[in-house]
Image: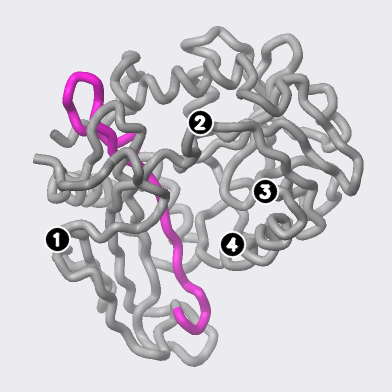
Amino acid sequence: MSKDIDWGSLGFGYIQTDKRFVANYKDGAWDAGTLTGDATVTMSECACVLQYAQTCFEGLKAYRTEDGRVVCFRPDLNAARMADSCRRLEMPVFPEERFVQAVHEVVAANLDFVPPYGSGATLYLRPFMFGSNAVIGVKPATEFQFRIFCTPVGPYFKGGAKPITIRVSDFDRAAPHGTGHIKAGLNYAMSLHAIMDAHRQGFAENMYLDPATRSKVEETGGANFIFITKDGKLVTPKSNSILPSITRRSLMVVAERYLGMPVEHREVLLSELGDFAECGLCGTAAVISPVGKVVDHGREICFPSGMEQMGSYTQKLYDTLTGIQMGRIPAPEGWLHTIA
């Protein structure tokens, strides 16, 4: 029985649900973990996360499919990416199988918050971990908490995805050998000024370049880029400081296996942007956000797909991936984790 929620008017915000998963790490081991109705976190004012930002997170969604199932999309990849984040941040890895099981338990305990099929809304899950004990010297915590909460969210773009205008940013998103490849909270904290500055200048997002040479396209603060060549090839930027987007990796498989499109994962130069027919940003929240124009310090790079709608190839990629997620199109083996 679904909750009494106006699914059609949901925004992309937080609504408290019934249960969340909590596990604690102490004395070198994780406890069994539990589901709880308590949405609050209590910790020391000197907790490592508050002093030195020792935290990482993930984001994934649960959906109701056309045939009535409730599924999650590729939670094993979120588990693996979070394990990489933890290792880089000197945090204990939450075992990947337990991560997937905890995702399963949280969705199962909040089934009434999973929006109905066809509503455009989904159940967003936020796994995260942080250093919880008091640390005043600069060093890793010794105690950690891992949590997963969920919240129903509406479509990222109300009324469809209109192409956006973005700018080439003067800020760097990541250091050459830094933390750009993991989902560390600190990456997002440092991006807040850059995104607000972009908004104040009238742009929807930033295009970050590689920090070493500032000649290659990397990503935005929260999404990977995809480009389509004029002859229908999918090109995705490659760099050690780009977060490996699960949506982007999935779109590469969809392009090749479902749509017969050639795929290239390679360095993309800022100077070649004008050669592409279509551009998009891809991530969990919006799946694909079409980009109509990139402004590079006053120089406008307009994609032939225009500012009115998604390009035809981008639309096919979007329709196919969302079709897989919603159960309308058969999924590759292991992509959908069935919960109910």
Looking at the rendered structure, the kind of residue marked 1 is: Leu
Instruction: Name the mark nearer the viewer: 3 or 4.
Output: 3
Mark 1 or mark 4: whose residue is earlier in sequence: 1
Q: Residue at x 34, y 14 (%)?
A: 329
In space, the residues marked 3 and 4 are separated at their CA atoms by: 16 Å
The quarter of the picture where the N terminus appears is: top left
Residue position marked by numbered label 2 in the rendering: 160
37 lies above or below 305: below
Looking at the rendered structure, the kind of residue marked 3 is: Glu
Mark 2 or mark 3: whose residue is earlier in sequence: 2
Residue 105 painted magenta:
no
* Number of other residues with Cα within 10 Å of mark 3, as a class: few under 14, some 14 to 19, many 20 or more: many
Residue position marked by numbered label 1 in the rendering: 35
Residue position marked by numbered label 4 in the rendering: 187
Please tell me whether mark 2 sits on a helix, a strand or a loop.
loop
Instruction: Name the mark nearer the viewer: 3 or 1.
Output: 3
Q: Residue at x 85, y 50 (%)?
A: 213
Residue 98 place in picture, x, y as percent: 23, 51
The quarter of the picture where the C terminus appears is: top left
Stretch of the chain drawn in magenta: 50-75
* Number of other residues with Cα within 10 Å of mark 1, as a class: few under 14, some 14 to 19, many 20 or more: some
